Image: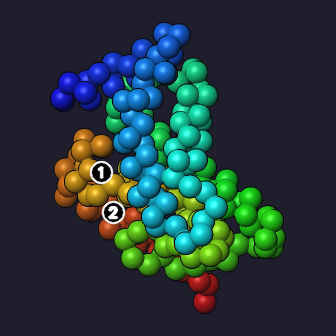
Amino acid sequence: MDDAAAQVTRLLQQAGDEQDGWERLLPLVYEELRGLAERRMGAERAGHTLQATALVHEAYLRLIGDTEMAWESRRHFFGAAAEAMRRVLVDHARKVRSQKRGGDRARLALTGLDLPGGDDPDHLLALDEALDQLAAEDPRAAEVARLRFFAGLSVADTAAALDVSERTVMREWSFARARLSAWLAPPG
């Protein structure tokens, strides 16, 4: 582990104990979180009302809002950041849907490697529900899918984040895509 990563891990473990721990942590992780958010927002539809900066700030506030949280490592923090970004996007999609559409969710097919964009936040909500199902069935496959979809990590970066081999990530990713596609396929 390089010195910067070790410093982040140390600050994460001490952040809740020290008065200024979160303020010292933010500059060290902000650019990386912003990169994750920009990759995530790049997969969203054009004209999305949520910007990458707002996504980073909202996710960070959710992360530090849980003062009881004990961060074990940098990996733990960034996994939680991906989940926080997911929750922000899902909450945003719910808000948009309730304002624009109401009604029931439509099930849409999962295509490609990235989270499909589109003008319909119902797709994001259906994906969120499918990820919850996947987590109940295979937690590691769900974690791989969350890191790939919501953090925009490559196979190599996902393997490093989870401390597993790239081959394991590819296997879990294949399984996750197959299960998600089956759950998101239109009925019929």
Determine which of the numbered discs, if any, sits on residue 86 in the image: none
Residue at 26% x, 50% y: name it: 157
Image location of residue 91, percent across then percent down: 67, 53
Image location of residue 162, percent across then percent down: 30, 43
Task: Decide: few, some or many residues near mark 1? Use Cα within 10 Å; few <14, some 14-19, many ≥20.
Answer: many
Quadrant (top left, top right, bottom left, bottom right) of the N terminus: top left
Image location of residue 6, percent across then percent down: 26, 24
Label 1 residue SS = helix
Residue 133 visible from this viewpoint: no
Task: Decide: few, some or many residues near mark 2? Use Cα within 10 Å; few <14, some 14-19, many ≥20.
Answer: many
Q: Is residue 14 left or right of residue 95?
A: left
Q: Is residue 69 left or right of residue 158?
A: right
Select label 2 or label 1 by which is in front: 1
Residue 67 visible from this viewpoint: yes
Can you identify the residue that label 1 sits on?
158
Determine which of the numbered discs, if any, sits on residue 173 in the image: 2
Asked if the residue at tag 1 contacts the one at tag 2, i.e. Cβ–Cβ closer than 8 Å, the answer is yes
Picture quadrant where residue 111 is located: bottom left
Residue at 30% x, 43% y: name it: 161
Q: Amino acid at mark 2?
A: Trp
Depth order, front residue of 82/31? 31
Q: Amino acid at mark 1?
A: Thr
Q: Is residue 184 left or right of residue 3?
A: right
Depth order, front residue of 48/86? 48
Residue 170 higher or lower than 82, as above or below = below
Number of numbered discs on residues: 2
Residue 80 higher or lower than 92, as above or below = above
Label 2 residue SS = helix
- Mark positioned earlier in the residue sequence (2 or 1): 1
| Distance of label 2 from label 1 (alpha carbons) | 10 Å
Residue at 38% x, 41% y: name it: 31
